[in-house]
Amino acid sequence: MKRTMLYVIAGVVVIAVVIGALAWRSRSVARPGAESRSAVVARGTIRVAVSASGSVEPQARVGLAFETAGRVAEVAVEVGDVAKAGDVLARLDPRQLTLQVQQAQAALALAGAQLGGLQAGARPEEIAAAEANLRAVQAQVGAAAANLDGLEGGPGDAQVAAAQADLASAISQQKAALDMHDLTLTCVAFTLPTGERREICPALGDPEEQARYNLQAADKRLAAAQARLDELLAGTDADQVRAAQANVWAAAAQRDAAQAQLDLLLAGATDAQVTDAEAQVTQAQAALEQAQLALERATLRAPFDGVVATCSVTAGEMASAGLPAIVLLDTSRFHVHVSVDEMDVARLAEGQTAQVTLDALPDALISGTVERIAPVATLEGGVVDYDVAIGLSPTDAPIRADMTANATVVVEELVDVLTIPTWVVRVDRSTGQTYVHRQVGDKVERVDVELGVRYEGVAQVLGGLAEGDVVVWVPESGPFDLGSQ
């Protein structure tokens, strides 16, 4: 009996404890303690933005390089100098390139002269010279043919008689020369009236030398006359006939060539020749322009007004072709290039307003406009980003190229909508329903809500609450706090 009473008492105590606990919890919910926070549902504006970071770029950045290698003759600027469009920045030694231009000009002049000659036709003096040459060659053909005919027909009586007469004359001339030679060597003896005998000898020297020369010449004429007569009497051999025939053929070939040259002069240039000459002129003109361009590009000039960023050449050294010698910046306007995640880039559009801050100038807030969105992405480290260019508005801030920049682009603006802070919103784990605790008088009740856009700690209320409602946050187990996520 006592044991039963103990069980009853114990049961009453347990029930009392449970009821007390429930009552305490009810009071704690109905009367929020010092740990609770509250907010009022109010109308406001929600701005949704995309933020990204990047760097400042000038309006233009160009690396100027020499197209041909050469020795640097002059460097007219230093880093930091301001250059105007067209100013000389640096130049190579132009002497070799100038010679190439002169050679190309001479080649063009020659090609033009040849084309002009073809188009004008042969000059009268050229035709007269060609006709004279043809007549001379024809005469050579006739002489060669006559010589061949004489060899093939054999010597006639007249030829033999003439050769014999020539031989007799040569014998007579040789004898006279011999007598004269002997006379120059003979001494003459005579007796004076006094009876004294004397002898006169010709003086040696010029008379004796002349006599010897005359005798040698007479001997040669005699030998030649004798050989000619012997040749006529012996007849013509086959080698002589073949040589004479070759002379006839050679003379005939020269005649044909002279005739063809005259015909060409009289006919004038063909269309193909003129076309070829015109092509030569065009090629020479292109070569000249290329040489002139190479000479022009041996001087680096500023393509726009700008600031010299780098200068990597020195006067007197050899400059390489294709490597940037001078980098010029156009700082008249700046852009910010940022990388935007693929999840956000679809929310951007050209013309949207942006706010830009610079790490180097934390107090400067610069406005800008989205000017270009890259059509293709860049993949780096598995992250897909798109390059977005934001043009900066004019500002007095001392902006410099390559500064680190942070840009915020407002992509959506909701005006006059109900808003609540996200820290009061909870999500039911079992149903996924969002809800808040609304304070009504001295009590707090759960209210399911429908939310819209959420950005930077503010949520749009689409349903469940009205303007002026007070929402509170109190700690509880089970559902979790949306604002803490």
Image (tube, helix red, strand yellow):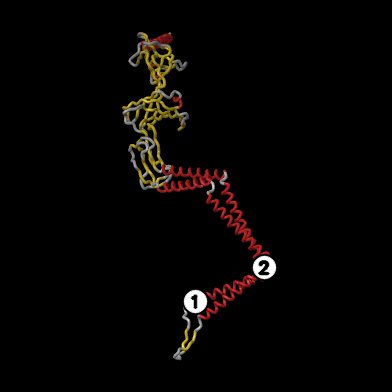
Q: Position of residue 277 (x, y in %)?
A: 53, 45
On screen, 135 above or below 409? below
Residue drawn 46% across and 91% down? 195
Residue 401, quarter of the rendered image: top left
Instruction: Please name the amino acid that badge 1 sits on.
Output: Glu
Q: Is residue 406 left or right of residue 132?
A: left
Residue 135 disc label: none
2 or 1: tag closer to the N-terminus: 2
Q: Around disc 1, counting alpha carbons within 10 Å, would you say few (fewer than 14), some (14 to 19), or many (20 or more)?
A: few
Residue 156 disc label: 2
Q: Position of residue 462 (x, y in %)?
A: 43, 13
Q: Nearer the viewer, residue 167 or 342?
A: 167
Circle 1: element type: helix
Q: Position of residue 93 (x, y in %)?
A: 39, 47
Q: Position of residue 370 (x, y in %)?
A: 41, 26
Residue 467, quarter of the rendered image: top left
Q: CA distance from mark 2 to mark 1?
A: 41 Å
On screen, 421 above or below 364? above
Is residue 478 among the parts visible in the rendering?
A: no
Furthest residue toward right: 153
On screen, 47 above or below 391? above
Where is mark 1, residue-wise? 209
